[in-house]
Amino acid sequence: MSHGYLSLHGYLSLSGPVGSSGVAAPHYRGSRYFLMALAAMVLGFFLAMSSAWADGGTGVPNAVPPKGEYEGKNVEQPIEFPHNIHVDVNKINCMYCHTYARRSKVAGIPPTSKCMGCHLVIATDKPRIKKLTEYWEKKEPPRWKKVHDVPDFVHFTHEKHLKRFVFDNEGMSVDRVPEVCAFCHGEVKKMTVAHKVKPLNMGFCARCHEANKGPFDCWKCHK
Amino acid sequence: MSGNDINRRDFLKILGWSGVGVAVAGCDRPTTVTLEEGKEEVVAYLQPEEYVIPGVGVWFASTCQQCPAGCGVHGRVREGRVLKMEGNPDSPINKGKLCQMGQAGVQGHYNPDRLKKPMLRKGGALAEVSWEEALALLEQKTGSASGLAGDRFAWFTGTVSGHQSVLLSAHLAAMGSKNHFIHETINNAVVRAVNQDMLGEAMPRYDLPAAKMVLSFGADLVGAGASPVHFSGEYAKFRTGSQRGVLVQVEPKMTLTGGSADLWVPIRPGTEGILALGIAKQVLLGDEVKLAGLPENIRTLVTGYDVEKVASITGVTGDRIMRIAKLLKERSPSLVLAGASVEGHAHGYQSAAAIMVLNIVLGNIGKTVLPSGSSAFPQMEAKAGGTRDLLALADAADKKALDVVFFHGANPVYTAPAALGLNDKLKNIPFKVAFAVYPDETAMSADLVLPILSVHEDWGTHMGVYQPEQKSISIQQPLMERLYPDTKGFGDLLLALLKVRQVKEYESFADYYGYLKNAFAALPASVKGDAVSDEDFWGKSLQKGVLNVGTVAGSLNPRMVEISFPEFKSDAQEYYLVPSARLGLWDGRHANLPWLQEAPDQISKVVWTSWVEMHPATAAKLGVKEGDFVKVTSAQGAVEAQVYVYKGIHPQVIAVPMGQGHEEYGRYAKGRGVNPLKILAPVTDAKTGELALYGTRVTVAQSGRREVLVKLMGSETQLGRKMVSTVTASVFDRTEGTKNVT
């Protein structure tokens, strides 16, 4: 139990209930966002140069990818977010947007402010970006539909899985993280909006835990 | 499921169609809890605070309001929702611990039956109105132009403290009224009166760890007492110190504390004072020096109580009395305490005074009974309540002496015995306003109901009724945004009421938050510590949640009071009724929290209902078994519940727990079990005027019905399975070489 000592003043006005938005007024500071956009582009460039990123990589070291297929349905989202353009074309690391994955049980949908960090200047003429900008100006985040989920009685944490397969995994580099994400989320870099292609059921989890010598006690997940 | 129109056949149909998930939701629209893709929404922050990580909780300090103890808490907040309560380690009251009532506080906040809109009685029924209308009505009835005479206005509250108490007093002063009724059914008002008269201080400090023995007459230290979590901690120190303290509990019905005692002594109700004097005589026997050192009046009082006489009155055998006296002599200093079962009689004050005499005889004053001193902020200290003010309200209403009464934090319509006729008498008060979170009995019989914020949404400051050595003010801050937009903070409403009376002092404050911030800035430098600015001090105070305010040393001056007892007659036909209190439903205020309903009673293990507890000998005499329904009848009414048979009760006592039998109070509380307070006789303690909760006699009759009594643990014994291994004291003494218990 970690007790964060943070005063509540200011907090009240900023966090909403689950499934709703924060309500703070965005601060338009052009230079700041320009720098962020620049940073994103530099990051993209760096990733593009990375040899480990190349398609047909040798696979994640010390890992046996889980087996199992699932035919998910197409889920219509408020904006048809193109994962492929971001990941496959521009080589942006998954954790650049899903920044909570390495710190929390949930990977988190990026806050709208993060999208706008780049899209205040990038591709502003595209219809999807126009739609995004509308949301931003209305101070309302898009209401995305959930695609990947596990039941409430399953305690799954992104943080621990990234630790095992990426950060504490010898011979693994952080820029190859999409290959690890693909274990459970499929090749998202080839998709536009996410599409469920793995069963994410207990057999799927258990086979992977067995193959990779993950914890096998009932209460590790059912607590 | 009672709220949904669904019968068994529909249920099965739905189950067949759509699977369990939908059926559990109880209707045919899709549930929001699903693994199906594209059904649930997942919405990101627009722009998150830097410290917010979805899925990771942040803890904020606040104060528990589940009972008047005022424990400091930390609330876990995740994605803007408060999810879990823990104790605040910085609080000198609970030192990081929290009881089940505190844990369940979060369920009160999310209770689906919370009041969401102001309601006004129109043509007999309550109807929703706007806040504008409600506040305009308040101004019309209580404003400066209302013509309402001060003494015809009253506040009726539970225990209040902190800045709410300051504002409430300011409002009373502005109204020109002195009528502040403070009501708590679970209280120690009689003991406080005795302490005030005999020691010069109502609530001295008890140093449990310094005592080598505690002799408790019905004081439920670790259960439904003045500060359950604090005394549980003190009790643990008392038991685990270099010499393990011995606890002897004397009471008519076993409490949670009694269940932990080394020696549990059942006693005939109302005779505790006699036993205390009998023990005092035994302690003094042969100790001429000590006897000579005592005041004359104590010597003469004590000498009248021979073992034989005491044994015949109390039903406690002579050798037991001598054994307790021997233990007390060997283990000095000790601590003798009086609790609810002592207070709740017509001579409750006399019994509690006799118990204090035993403390004086044992020389405990100044050793384990210590002066608590005072804080620099007497106006913020808790105003503890009792039942005298409940009777006073009934009386004032009966005499048509009140025109407007404001209710907050107390539910007199539920707790008042039927014999008081409070419901009818309240009709004499033309305008009753309830400042309430839940639709309890009092709110539902009020003329105007104002929905206030839950404890986790509101601001406040509190001082617990029992203050340990380090006196402190505990801060209550919102742990999340309000769930219902049409609810208002209690402090905000107090300020609004003051504005209605044009009290200049308070007009500059926009809200209670602003008032508190200002009040904190005005605190003396000694409290502010190393804070560099007012803003810094405010921030630090909210982070810590507790302000240590320093203690001004006091002193105790033992004095004798007149003690005399009535003659105790024995009438075998009738039983004494014990309306037992427990850490859980408390006085009934927690009956709307499912967690506490399903948490088994600590002694009987019964859940979700009321029961009638009796001794096996009594059950045999009445020819009843566990699960049989019996009717418990007093001169004032009757209640019917299932029998629970247990040895931890005096054979002449029938116990029915408090807390159930609500006629209102939402879906979890309403229509469940019975309320023993309703059948209490209108007997009061002669000296203090407090309701004698244990002063009712009842008859018990089988009603012929029988059902399984729902409880955890089917058997009182381990049936030889050795789940908890035990050894006898003599074996333990031989093998471990200790001599703890004689």
Image (tube, helix red, strand yellow):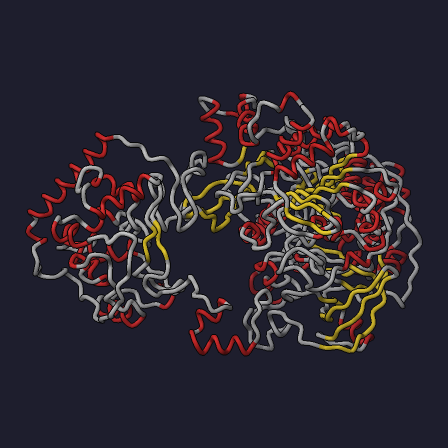
The number of callouts visible is 0
| Nearer to us in this view, B596 or B314 | B596
Side of A189 relative to B80 (left or right): left
- Quadrant in which residue B497 is drawn: top right
Q: Is residue A167 above or below residue B623?
A: above
Q: Position of residue A216 (x, y in %)?
A: 31, 68
Q: Residue at point 72% right, 60% down?
A: B661
- Quadrant in which residue B711 is drawn: bottom right
Q: Is residue B350 above or below residue B251?
A: above
| Nearer to us in this view, A213 or A24 | A24
Side of B44 relative to B185 (left or right): left
Q: Quadrant of the N terminus of chain B?
A: bottom right
Q: Residue at point 35% right, 54% down?
A: B42
| Nearer to us in this view, B211 or B442 | B442
Q: Position of residue B422 (x, y in %)?
A: 81, 50
- Quadrant in which residue A118 is drawn: top left
Q: Position of residue A89 (x, y in %)?
A: 11, 51
Q: Quadrant of the C terminus of chain B?
A: bottom right
Side of B388 relative to B512 (left or right): right
| Nearer to us in this view, B186 or B661 | B661
Q: Residue at point 20% right, 63% down?
A: A186
Q: Residue at point 72% right, 77% down?
A: B706
- Residue B284 in sight in this render: no
- Residue B391 in sight in this render: yes
Q: Position of residue B650 (x, y in %)?
A: 78, 64
